Amino acid sequence: MKFIKNCLAVTFLVFANTINIQAREAGDVNYDNYVNTVDSSVVLQHTLNKNFAIDEKYADVDKNNSVNAADAALIYAHILRNEVELKIGDDIVEEKIEQPVLNDELSQSLERVIRITKTKVIYNLSTYNEKKIARYILSSMEAYYADRSYNIQNDAAVAREMYYELTNEEKNFFKSIINSSYSATDVNNLKFIFKDFLQ
């Protein structure tokens, strides 16, 4: 319950974030031809009180035949990052970079980035939240380096969500540390880990 209340509070804080869409696409549960935080809030209200009627055809954006907080979260993610396509009947797709097989070149890049993260990046970041993300990425890279079958993309998705919770100032500083610490070649080789932190 506390989680849902927090989601509602955050949703209302970013009320101004609105994305214009064509009429009656998925997520437009209040029929105003926009997908915005009002729609996310309405979906959350419906999950708390099923007597709160909405058009579930437009609220079930993940098309799993259930309207729940995940749908509200997807609407919210669409508003904040405009990364998720919300269209009736379509799958929800985020741009993904495939995790490559770790060959010699990638192994060397990963080795360098792990070393630099330990000796330079974490020490140069300034806030607790920035360092927390760097430590999380570091532990994920170490796990991937030790076990080539380790799915680092799941960890990258978690790190991305942590990154989006940073202030704009923290994001910019985090990016500047990444760009100044690692070589462009290493970052490019490991873009399946770093792409979200460099946009």
Image (cartoon, rainbow, N blue to C red):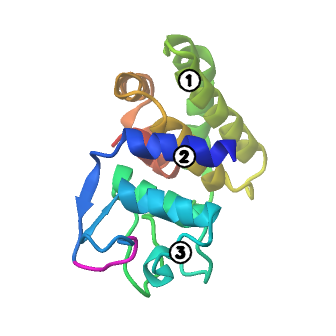
The CA distance from mark 2 to mark 1 is: 20 Å
Would you say 191 lies left or right of 18 here? right
Mark 2 vs 3: CB contact within 8 A: no
Magenta-highlighted residues: 23-27
The CA distance from mark 2 to mark 3 is: 18 Å
Residue 59 lies in magenta, yes or no? no
Q: Is residue 97 visible?
A: no
Q: Which mark is residue 181?
A: none
Residue occupying image coordinates x 52% and y 77%: 60
Q: Residue tagged by mark 1?
A: 129
Q: Give the structural element (helix, strand or loop) at label 1.
A: helix
**Residue 161 on image: x %, y %:** 53, 44
Please tell me which residue lies in front, 152 or 66. 66
**Residue 193 on image: x %, y %:** 53, 46
Please tell me which residue lies in front, 18 or 197. 18
**Residue 57 on image: x %, y %:** 47, 84
Residue that lies at the very extreme toward the front in this rendered image: 51
Q: Is residue 66 visible?
A: yes
Q: Give the structural element (helix, strand or loop) at label 3.
A: loop
Mark 1 vs 3: CB contact within 8 A: no
Residue 26 lies in magenta, yes or no? yes
Please tell me which residue lies in front, 166 or 17. 17
Residue that lies at the very extreme toward the right in this rendered image: 147
Q: Residue tagged by mark 3?
A: 62
Q: Which mark is residue 7?
A: 2
> Compared with residue 116, is residue 82 higher up or lower down, i.e. above or below?
below
- In front of the other: label 2 or label 3? 2
Report the amino acid beneath label 2.
Cys
Q: Earlier in the sequence, mark 2 or mark 3?
A: 2
Residue occupying image coordinates x 56% and y 23%: 129
Report the amino acid beneath label 3.
Asp
Q: Give the structural element (helix, strand or loop) at label 2.
A: helix
